[in-house]
Every structure is written in structure tokens, then in C-alpha cells.
Amino acid sequence: MIPISIVGAGPGALDLMTIRALERLKHAEVLVWADSLIPSQIAALAPEKCKRISSSSLTLEEIISLLIEEHRKGKKVVRLHDGDPCLYGALSEQICRLAEAGIDVEVVPGLSAYQATAATLNAELTIPGLVQTIVLSRAGGRTGIPEKERLENIASLGASLCLYLSARHIEKVEETLLKFYQADTPVIIGHRVSWEDQWLKVVPLKQMASTSKKQGLIRTTLYVISPALKQNRNRSKLYEPKHSHLFRSSSKES
């Protein structure tokens, strides 16, 4: 039997879906989708006769039961996630339970919100000589985080930091980050990035919490904190005339 497809829908815009994701969606016979996190226009891309099941009110056990039931009927089943299923999507839990039922899975990656957010503002998150690391993480909430990944530890790197699922804890987040980043470090606040009603704003770190509270942000929000967002003229050595590599000889000094 064909595997169940766990598909990343991307951040929200139809034209930011991958070709593979679109192909799986257009041939779906059963669609189990995160309706609270994915625009309805994306679910509408499935065939008219496709059975659509909203997952926002379901437990993981109920979702797995539905996937198994529909798959055993010989249906082409698509489990549609927002963004990329490999990030905060309970992917491992679903795959393990489906494997226990003898069902194969294919995972179709999707563009993540941090990429769409940076691209919308023409921003590069890795600037030579300034920052070369991107950290994707979240604030500790009810699910908690490993002790070694506490915000204090990852913030101490001074890297480009992308925080998901953190709007409800933003005051504590700001307090912690100010210990490691300058108060004027730019922060992109992105709500429903690439949706028709997206809201994006760049503020200094010291205004991150107050801006979030004023806007009433509690979910579907991403924070990108990075020194790379400051205007600078640092250039990559890869493209310097004097730098040689496999495909180019260095220019001689005059």
C-alpha cells in the first residue's frame, strides 16, 4: 500500500508550498489538517471529493486512529502540517505509532516561518564576521525544554535566534535575552507570516514584550532576534577577488 504522506504546508501563502507538497495535496483522498494553523485556501486545493478532517480539536490518539482507519481502506491519506513537519509538529510521535501499526510514512518538508519572515524583509541571518549560526528554539512552557537548552544557554551564543511558540511568555523571554543581547538589537515580530492578514514589525529588543502585548499576540507568532538585522557592510570572503576555490582562481594583486 502507498504510505501516508505527512506534508508541510509552508508558512501560509499558497505560492510558498513546495511542488511536491502541492502534488500530494491535489491527489489526496483523505486530508487530516491542522485547520487552526493553516489557511483554508490551502485545504481547498485538495480534490472536491476529498474527505477533509480538521485536527485542531483532536488528540494525537484520535488523529492516529483516523489515519490508520482511512489508510486501511486503501485511501491516499495526507496529514497536513503548518510550516515544516520536522519542527514542533509531533512528527516522531506520529511516525512511531504508525510504524507500530505496520504503516509506512513519507515526510514532505515545508518552508518554515523563520525563512519566510527573513525573506519578507530582505534580511540575511548569517553575516560574515558577525553571526554565522541560526538557532531555532522556543521558550519553556507547559511542555518544558531540556535543561541544557534553557534560553539562558542558547542566548549566550549571541546567534540569530528564532523563537517559536513563545508569545505567551514574552515578558520573561525579553528579560532573559537582555542579559545577552544589546537592548537595541533588532527583533522581527511576525504574526501569521505570509498569510493575507500577516503582521510584521521590527523593534529593538527592549520593546519586544510591550509591542507584543499591545498587539495582543498569543499564538502563531515568531520572533527573530539577531545582530545580523542591523545594517552593515561585512562581506563574504568567498566572493573576494583574492579568494580562490575549486571553481575560481584568485585575482593577482596589482
Image (cartoon, rainbow, N blue to C red):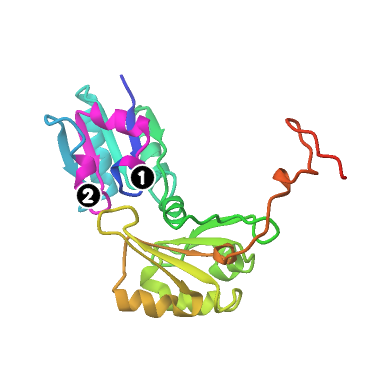
Picture disc at residue 242: none
- How dense is the environment of label 1, judged by Cα within 10 Å: few (below 14), some, or many (20 and up)? many
Q: Position of residue 102 (x, y in %)?
A: 35, 27
Q: Amino acid at mark 1?
A: Gly
Q: Position of residue 176 (x, y in %)?
A: 53, 76
Query: Which span is picked out in magenta?
Result: 15-43
Where is 114 relative to 108, above or below? below
Q: Position of residue 156 (x, y in %)?
A: 63, 69
Where, quadrant-wise, is the N terminus in this rendering?
Answer: top left
Where is 204 relative to 90, above or below? below
Q: Are marks 2 and 1 in contact (CB under 8 Å)?
A: no
Q: Please tell me which residue is depicted at 44% across the width and 58% down the height of the picture.
A: 121
Q: Please tell me which residue is depicted at 42% across the width and 51% down the height of the picture.
A: 116
Where is 199 relative to 43, above or below? below
Is residue 84 on the magenta stretch?
no
Q: Secondary structure at mark 2?
A: loop
Q: Secondary structure at mark 1?
A: loop
Q: Farthest residue in the top direction?
A: 1
Q: Amino acid at mark 2?
A: Asp
Q: Label 2: which residue?
A: 35
Q: Label 1: which residue?
A: 10
Q: Farthest residue in the right direction?
A: 254
